[in-house]
Amino acid sequence: MRLAILLVLSISVPAAHAQDPPDFRDKLLDTLGPAAPTPLTREQGFQAYLLNTIGPIPIIGEGLGSALAQRTDSPSEWGQGWAAYGKRFGSNLAYNAVRQTISYSVASALHEDYRYFGSPDQGVWRRARHALVSTVAARRSDGREVFSFASVASVAGASSLSSIWGPPSWKGAANISEIAGISFASTAAFNVIREFLPDILGRPRK
């Protein structure tokens, strides 16, 4: 989970400013912070899809998320040990791959840009509200913010398909809805941290 990476960075980076190379925080912000408000070309969109699916950030993030699930014994049917960690890690990677593929496919068909864009407003509450709303919002080529069918369909699809390879506690409408709710909540929290990441790193907002 990228959220796990950002939570670690939000704690560790401010204390390490003095040791950072001059461009470290800029590169970090480019990688994990809000997207620049410029349209993506089709080639750039595909490259972003690949990075979001098999790039180093999702691999590290899913590894950390799997370690957290291992510690909390979730799902309990998979138990403990390296074999159980492998199941959790593989499942997380598969879930992310399904989610990213659905997002990319639907967004391409509907011309949605579902990247996270920073809030143009000032004030903590307004910026936080923007981050939360962005969980289910996207931009069109003319700059309008619209409901993101890609974001919603990807979570619903990945949550449903993961029940096929998941344990019994992942099956059934109620459990699938719970998994989807956790995904939306994690994305919302991720967006909030991304919104304030420039402040954490001491960098100007895009």
Image: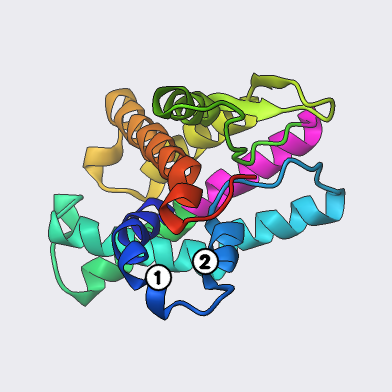
Q: Is residue 51 above or below residue 198?
A: below
Residue under the image location 78 percent in, 38 percent down: 108
Q: Is residue 146 above or below residue 54?
A: above
Q: CA distance from mark 2 to mark 1?
A: 9 Å
Instruction: Mark 2 and mark 1 in contact? Answer it, CB < 8 Å.
Output: yes
Residue under the image location 41 percent in, 33 percent down: 184
Residue under the image location 49 percent in, 61 percent down: 58
The region drawn magenta spans 96-111
Q: Quadrant of residue 179?
A: top left
Q: Quadrant of residue 140?
A: top right
In which quadrant will I find the C terminus?
Answer: top right
Q: Residues within 10 Å of mark 1 (few under 14, many from 20)?
A: some
- Secondary structure mostly seen in the magenta stretch: helix
Residue under the image location 38 percent in, 51 percent down: 3
Q: Name the residue nearer the viewer: 121 or 53.
A: 121
- Circle 1 is placed at which residue position? 17
The kind of residue tagged 1 is His
Q: Confirm whether the magenta stretch covers residue 110.
A: yes
x and y percentages locating residue 138 in the rendered image: 66, 29
Residue 25 is tagged as 2
Q: Is residue 75 above or below residue 177?
A: below
Q: Secondary structure at mark 2?
A: helix
Q: Confirm whether the magenta stretch covers residue 8.
A: no
x and y percentages locating residue 162 in the rendered image: 41, 45
